[in-house]
Image (cartoon, rainbow, N blue to C red):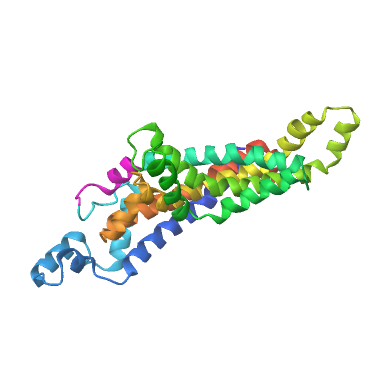
């Protein structure tokens, strides 16, 4: 197991290095002068040069890249150009809210997807199966930038049951989690259905039925238990996607997380903060993938020998 984890770490490290490099190049090669954006076109040349020197933008690109790598290694990502607060501290303050949203959304997705997918597989080719898959198709088809405002109009504006936005109470998480988790529930329910139908066709299911095992035990103890392995893998991978995909949902619901901070940094052309946010999201995705690989090896020992 230790050798497997080391192998996965050796694969993840070059990926993280590539992510760091891409983030630096994309931000620095994007058209537009951050100094001119900050000071305006009417600023004096001397003021521009002074600010450019303070930000280190007058140095060659290679030196800036080396300084950026050193900063990443020491968790020193510089300071925000506007708030003057440390980038790492800003991200550290906002990241827990994004993580809470992603975990709650995943809980919503799993709570809907597993029963729906299992029921559809158990009632294959019946109206229950077709109805479940129709609901999942609706879930996949509804983008978060449409579903979020719709939920606000219904549950916050019309019925006044839930808060419109913010993170002032525990109830504030319900609408953002439903928005982010519905699409994931649709994907996982379809995957649960297909893997469970495949499991129901295996020989061990026929053997269990021949031994007189009750149908409910065959469905849930044997078929569903085997079908959940690929579902768990996909769910773990999608958790990383949720950390990145929460940008739109956090903006709609004014959720004080990393996604909203990223949008604010982009609107303000705050390059150090943009670098830090994008880098954090990308590295989070890589680390979640690494964690899923390790979990998969724990669940299925055959993976370690590949």
Q: Position of residue 304 (x, y in %)?
A: 66, 42
What is the span of residues highlighted in magenta in the rendered image? 83-94
Residue 191 seen: no
Q: Is residue 79 above or below residue 206?
A: below
Residue in view at x 28 percent, y 43 percent: 89
Quadrant of the drawing holding the N terminus: top right
Of residues 192 and 258, the one nearer the viewer is 192
Is 261 or 85 nearer to us in this picture?
A: 261
Residue 93 magenta: yes
The outermost residue toward the front is 158
Where residue 138 sits in the image (x, y, percent)? 59, 52
- The answer to whether residue 134 is visible is yes
Q: Is 43 placed left or right of 148 in the picture?
A: left
Residue at left 44%, top 56%?
A: 17
Establish if 301 lies above or below 265. above
| Left or right position of 222 against 98 | right
Question: Is 271 above or below relative to 246?
Answer: below
Q: Nearer the viewer, residue 96 or 58?
A: 96
Q: Residue at x 73, y 32 (%)?
A: 220
In this picture, residue 268 sits left or right of residue 255: left
Q: Position of residue 305 (x, y in %)?
A: 69, 44
- Splitting the image into 4 quarters, where does residue 163 fall? top left
How many numbered marks appear? 0
The x and y percentages for residue 137 are: 62, 53
């Amino acid at each position: 197991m230790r050798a497997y984890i080391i192998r996965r770490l050796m694969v993840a490290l070059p990926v993280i290095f590539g992510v760091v490099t891409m983030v630096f190049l994309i931000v620095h090669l994007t058209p537009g002068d951050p100094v001119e954006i900050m000071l305006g076109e009417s600023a004096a040349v001397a003021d521009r040069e002074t600010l450019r020197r303070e930000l280190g933008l007058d140095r060659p690109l290679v030196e800036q890249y080396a300084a950026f790598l050193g900063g990443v290694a020491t968790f020193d990502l510089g300071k925000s150009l506007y708030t003057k607060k440390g980038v790492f501290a800003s991200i550290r303050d906002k990241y827990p809210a994004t993580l809470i949203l992603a975990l709650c959304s995943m809980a919503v997705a799993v709570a809907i997807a597993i029963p729906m997918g299992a029921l559809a597989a158990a009632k294959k080719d019946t109206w229950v199966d077709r109805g479940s898959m129709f609901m999942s198709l609706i879930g996949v088809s509804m983008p978060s930038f449409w579903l979020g405002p719709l939920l606000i109009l219904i549950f916050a504006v019309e019925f006044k049951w839930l808060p419109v936005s913010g993170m002032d109470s525990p109830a504030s998480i319900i609408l953002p989690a439903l928005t982010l988790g519905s699409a994931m529930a649709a994907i996982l329910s379809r995957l649960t259905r297909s893997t469970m139908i495949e499991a129901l066709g295996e020989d061990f299911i026929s053997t269990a039925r021949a031994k007189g095992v009750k149908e409910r035990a065959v469905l849930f103890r044997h078929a569903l238990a085997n079908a959940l392995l690929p579902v768990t893998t996909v769910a773990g991978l999608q958790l990383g996607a949720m950390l990145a995909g929460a940008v739109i949902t956090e903006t709609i619901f004014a959720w004080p997380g990393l996604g909203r901070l990223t949008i604010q940094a982009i609107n303000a052309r705050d390059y150090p903060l943009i670098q830090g946010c994008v880098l954090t999201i990308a590295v989070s995705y890589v680390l979640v993938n690494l964690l899923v690989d390790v979990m998969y090896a724990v669940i299925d020992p055959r993976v370690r020998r590949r």
